[in-house]
Image (cartoon, grey):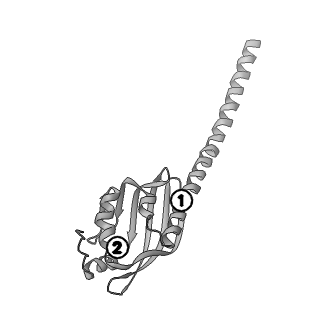
Amino acid sequence: MIPSILHTLRSSALAVVTMVGIGLLPHMATAGTVDTEVGNKQRVTEAFDRWAAGGTTFFSDMLWPDVIWTIKGSGPSAGVYRGIDSFVEQAVRPFVSRLSSPVKPVSKRVWADGDHVIIQWDGVGVARDGQAYRNSYAWIFLMRDGKAIEATAFLDLAPYDDVLRRIPAVAADNG
């Protein structure tokens, strides 16, 4: 009878420990997720703040070298860019070279959910012909170790493509 009671007690104790452990798992996972979210949100917010203050290193600060950047839409600028060099050379530089005043964020909201950070922001700049450029953006970053490994960008491509169409490209300096 005593072995039977001991077996029952051990089984009961194991069940209690298992239930307590299972009950703690979501809280443990949540703590790690919250830390990740807070860290990612802070890093992106600080990078945007530096950019708004005139900084020029946003993309190198926030993107992995092998980032996959997708511009959603159906215009000529929509597409997928593989690697930061491809993205900068094919999407950023051709646009920025047509501006006399670079695009700067003038407002932003940042949300974080696990490894994802969502940034809704408005940007303004001035094209080389003196016309203002304004656009609203939503970027979704998949973060890894504080940088985006994937980015999906939503914006009104009409004004973006208009700058590319309207303003001639700057000839490369062969110095």
Q: Is residue 1 visible?
A: no
The residue positioned 32% from the left and 62% from the top of the image is 87
The residue positioned 33% from the left and 83% from the top of the image is 128
* Residue 9 x/y as whole percent: 74, 22
* Residue 71 x/y as whole percent: 34, 65
The amino acid type, in three-letter code, at marker 2 is Val
Which mark is nearer the camera, 2 or 1? 2
If you read the primary sequence from the N terminus, does the residue marked by circle 2 or circle 1 appear first?
Answer: 1
Residue 89: which quarter of the image? bottom left
Count of marks, rendered view = 2
Q: Quadrant of the N terminus?
A: top right
Q: Disc 2 versus disc 1: distance between alpha carbons?
A: 24 Å
Q: Quadrant of the C terminus?
A: bottom left
The tag on residue 96 is: 2
The amino acid type, in three-letter code, at marker 1 is Arg
State the residue lying farthest toward the bottom.
130
Q: Which residue is mark 1?
A: 43
Residue 30, relative to residue 61: is it above or below? above
- SS class of the residue under badge 2? helix
- SS class of the residue under badge 1? helix
Q: Is residue 2 left or right of residue 109?
A: right
Residue 156, relative to residue 91: is it above or below? below
Specify few, some or many for label 1: CA neighbours under 10 Å numbering under 14, 14-19, or 20 or more.
some
The residue positioned 53% from the left and 56% from the top of the image is 40
